[in-house]
């Protein structure tokens, strides 16, 4: 069982930056960030492999968001720059046994989510 706790969300203006943190009680193959806006499905944002640090991103955030990890702290981060109103959502940290999937159904463990609101 892996417990995940997100933090770092908040209300910002368009163009601002935020850094989300996911503290994990253990490690699996991969960690990822997803987001869900009201009335919409949960969408993949970024993922990282614990062992190698390999990363992957959704097209909508490439060049603006960066996922990283700290092995000593069992933590994963999401640095979000140049935020846009369409980035407004609840952001979830998730853990999966392997790195290959970007589908929510393949992630076994989930955090409680942290709200990110970007005003125009």
Image (cartoon, grey):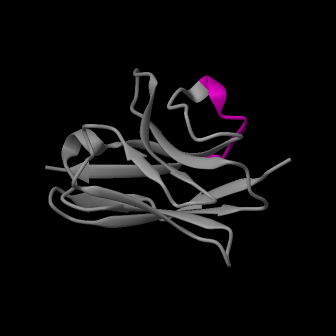
Query: Is residue 76 found left or right of 115 in the rendered image?
Result: right
Residue drawn 24% across the image and 62% down it: 81
Q: Note whether 50 is above or below 36 in the view shown.
A: below
Query: Is residue 37 found left or right of 70 in the rendered image?
Result: left
Front-most of 35 and 59? 59
The magenta-colored residue range is: 105-112
Query: Does the segment drawn in magenta span residue 17?
Result: no
Rendering coords of residue 51 (x, y %): 63, 60
Query: Is residue 99 found left or right of 117 in the rendered image?
Result: right
Front-most of 5 and 50? 50
Rendering coords of residue 119 (x, y %): 20, 51
The image quadrant of residue 86 is top left
Query: Is residue 79 found left or right of 8 in the rendered image?
Result: left
Residue drawn 26% across the image and 37% down it: 59
Label count reads 0
Residue drawn 41% across the image and 45% down it: 56
Residue drawn 19% across the image and 48% down it: 84
């Amino acid at each position: 069982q892996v417990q995940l706790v997100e933090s770092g969300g908040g209300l910002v203006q368009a163009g601002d930056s935020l850094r989300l943190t996911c503290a994990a009680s253990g490690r699996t193959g991969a960690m990822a960030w997803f987001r869900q806006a009201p009335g919409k499905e949960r969408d993949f944002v970024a993922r990282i492999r614990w062992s190698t640090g390999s990363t992957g991103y959704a097209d909508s955030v490439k060049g603006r968001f960066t996922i990283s990890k700290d092995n000593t702290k069992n933590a994963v981060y999401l640095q979000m720059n140049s935020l846009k109103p369409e980035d407004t959502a609840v952001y979830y940290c998730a853990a999966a046994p392997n790195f290959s999937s970007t589908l929510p159904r393949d992630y076994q463990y989930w955090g409680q989510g942290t709200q990110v609101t970007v005003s125009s």
